[in-house]
Image (cartoon, rainbow, N blue to C red):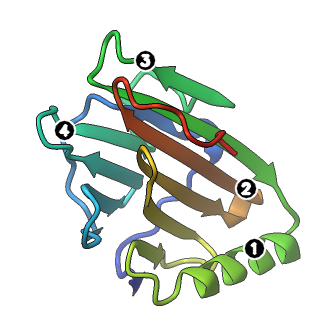
Amino acid sequence: MHHLLDLPYLDTRAEDLRWSVELAPLPALTVAEPADLPVQLRILGASHQVVLALPGSPALTETVAYLPQVATPLPTPVVRIEPATHPVSYEMRTRVRTLDESGLRREVDALLDALSGEPAAVSAVFPGHRHAATALHARRTGDGVEWRTWHAYPQHGQLVQTHTRVRRAGAVRTEETR
């Protein structure tokens, strides 16, 4: 599902993003709830949230957004939360790429084309720049669920990509994180 948003554009950059798995769901501009997946994919005015609700476990809400009140910067390249403190194993990998204007434009156009029509994806373009985009895509894995996100900041030539994998505590790792 792709959206053209109508709201004031907020310029930010990768260095301004904050991360949390403890915030409650924030007001979203658009929400997708893919069938047969225990996630809500939420695009915020300041980036994204993914709410994971596994039966028998408290919800886990991943937030990556421009939120000055949140202290933790976007972890790079990886953050892990192990089952000793949570009922799931959580791993998020982050990659920040700097591209020239044409490279960023090509990447964003290809991404939006690839996700077009995907039932487990949501994307949005923010006003002010047609390549200021946020996109999320989720899928089930053999032992859990994973999602990828993309955040394009054309004024700074940045493309922020995240890849999160969540498994139930005790799940056997069946494939290596890419």
Q: Amino acid at mark 1?
A: Glu
- 145 shown above or below 33: above
Q: Amino acid at mark 2?
A: Gln
Q: Is residue 44 left or right of residue 2?
A: left
How far is mark 1 from mark 3, CA to CA?
33 Å
Q: Nearer the viewer, mark 1 or mark 2?
A: 1
Disc 4 target residue:
59
Q: Nearer the viewer, mark 4 or mark 3?
A: 3
Residue 107 — which label? 1
Q: Position of residue 173 (x, y in %)?
A: 53, 34
Q: Amino acid at mark 3?
A: Glu
- For marks 4 and 3 on the same chain, the one whose residue lies earlier in the sequence: 4
- For marks 4 and 2 on the same chain, the one whose residue lies earlier in the sequence: 4
- For marks 1 and 2 on the same chain, the one whose residue lies earlier in the sequence: 1
- For marks 4 and 1 on the same chain, the one whose residue lies earlier in the sequence: 4
Disc 2 target residue:
158
Circle 3 packing at 10 Å, graded few (<14), some (14-19), many (20+), is some
Q: Residue furthest left?
A: 56
Residue 82 — which label? 3
Query: Does dot 1 land on a helix, a strand or a loop?
Result: helix
Residue under the point 47% across and 60% down? 10
